[in-house]
Image: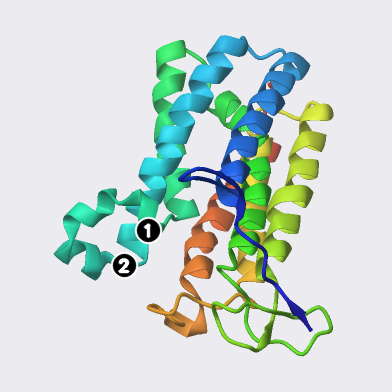
Amino acid sequence: MIAAQIDPIIFTIGPLAVRWYGMMYLLSFVGGYFMMVHICNLRRYPLNREAVADLLFYAVIGVVAGGRLGYTLFYQPAYYLEHPLEIFYIWQGGMSFHGGLMGVFIVLFWFARRRNIPLLQLGDLTVAAVPIGLGLGRIGNFINGELWGRPTELPWGMVFPAADLQARHPSQLYEAFLEGFVLLLVIYGLHRFGVKRGVPVAVFLLGYGLARFIVEFVREPDIHLGFLWGGATMGQLLSLPMMVVGGFLLLWLLKGQNDERN
């Protein structure tokens, strides 16, 4: 049985503490930028480095704003209705991936109209970078000892001191592998094969939704929510629409006559 106890602080400079979680965010943005530039060159998308930087900047705003609002609406609406100013206390934690996804969609819709670029093309470009952030973010969760899994007797079970002394699934690492590494390989492979426009977006929605839905079976549900309708967790209920939309979009694209590759 392994104790998952890693110092979340890399080093300190006076009163300033550099944390692993913040470092994961920084690496996500840098890695995402270079991946998007590479995909633009590979697929000959009409975006130069400056345009990619602009898109990434606005996407980050969409992630933070959407992720925070999504968390307040999906996970603790009653609390934030009584304490509305705390919605802006993002340093206290509390972000929702599904809310962030909606925030990014709004940004992509606006950016596509502003630059006169097909929305699905921008979506294909963006989802090539998202798994980098997802994977590194989950590693950050693991280092912080948060979002742990349910109790297990499997030999790789880990103790998360912030939870209790039971061996638990390191569900953060499961998610880092599936949502990060595997999904990155799949999406990048689709771009390398030059699939038609929109397929990477559809596969991302379907793939992330499926990965999250599966891992939620061994991830501890949020303590203030517990199990919801039909014994499902909030993460599973929010992932179902993603899988449905991704599946229908993929079928529509594969059956369509349009063979646009860019």
Residue type marked 1: Tyr
Outermost residue, left direction?
82
Question: Observer-nearest residue: 79 or 209?
Answer: 79
Question: Observer-nearest residue: 32 or 46?
Answer: 32
Which x, y percent locates residue 138? 63, 56
**Residue at image point 19% right, 53% down:** 85
Specify which label sits upstream in the sequence, 1 or 2: 1
Outermost residue, front direction?
14
Q: Secondary structure at mark 1?
A: helix
Question: Observer-nearest residue: 4 or 75?
Answer: 4
Where does the N terminus fall, quadrant-wise?
bottom right
Q: Is residue 231 above or below residue 134?
A: below
**Residue at image point 66% right, 64% down:** 172
Dividing the picture into quarters, in which one does residue 33 lie? top right
Q: Which residue is mark 1?
A: 71
Which x, y percent locates residue 250? 65, 44
Question: Mark 1 and mark 2: span between their CA atoms?
Answer: 7 Å
> Is there CB contact under 8 Å for labels 1 and 2?
yes
Which x, y percent locates residue 83? 18, 62
Q: Is residue 258 visible?
A: no
Q: Is residue 86 above or below residue 60?
A: below
The 10 Å Cα crowd at callout 1, few under 14, some 14 to 19, many 20 or more, is many
Question: Observer-nearest residue: 222 or 113?
Answer: 222
Q: Which residue is mark 2?
A: 76
